Image (cartoon, grey):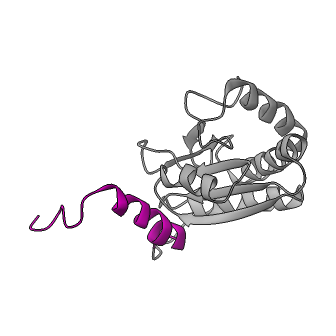
Amino acid sequence: MKYFGTDGIRGTYGDAHIREPFFYALGRAAAEWVAENFGKDALIVVGGDTRASTDSLKAAFCRGVAAGETAFFDAQVLPTPALPFCLLKKSAALGAMITASHNPFSDNGIKFFDSKGLKIDDETQTALEQKLEKYLDNAAYSPEKFEPRKIEAGAFAMNEYAAKMASIFPKDFLRGM
């Protein structure tokens, strides 16, 4: 595959694939794939981590999804395992998490989850890459500069995901810790 690696697309922010125009094109490709496979009324769930570039990349991806006339739910800031849970709760067709996981803070990326909350398969990655090519714009680009900002977990993470995680453990199991 040209863009996807072992676990999504990752790299240093501002490089060829980890920049806003690429994420916009990827949003368009995702919207097209979802419409073809699940219909125009299907939903894409999108979330992100706390990296400085995440908000900008996520906004570009969501603009691409919207341009493809597919609905999306912005799950805001949440841990990666919360995104598949949100996808299942919302009965979404696809989930997209803007994150570079354990990689350095200067990196970012995106990983996708299927309608069952699992990592997308190679066939879906290939289909997304093929669709992506027609939306790529090779115009001049300058990476954004980011200032420190207040970061808060999104409402889904703080409410539904936190409640689910709390339900897994016995009441007060951390008391005294």
Instruction: Identify which residue, 42 or 14, lies in the foreground.
Output: 42
Magenta-span inclusion, residue 165: yes
Q: Quarter of the image for the C terminus: give it.
A: bottom left
Q: Residue 13, how many percent across, how many down?
A: 58, 49
Where is residue 12 shown, x and y percent of the image? Answer: 55, 43
Q: Position of residue 155 (x, y in %)?
A: 52, 73
Side of 131 where 175 appears, left or right: left
Residue visible at 90% across and 41% down in the picture: 36
Residue at 72% over, 31% down = 125
In the rendered structure, the answer to whether residue 107 lies left or right of residue 61 reads left
Q: Is residue 23 magenta?
A: no
Span colored in magenta: 152-177
Q: Position of residue 100 (x, y in %)?
A: 50, 45
Residue at the spot x=69%, y=64% of the render? 73
Question: Which quadrant of the structure image shows residue 158?
Answer: bottom left
> Given the current orientation, which residue lies at the most extreme left position?
176
Front residue of this view, candidates 111 and 177: 177
Q: In this orientation, does residue 153 appear? A: no
Quadrant containing the N terminus is top right
Q: Residue at x 46, y 44 (%)?
A: 101
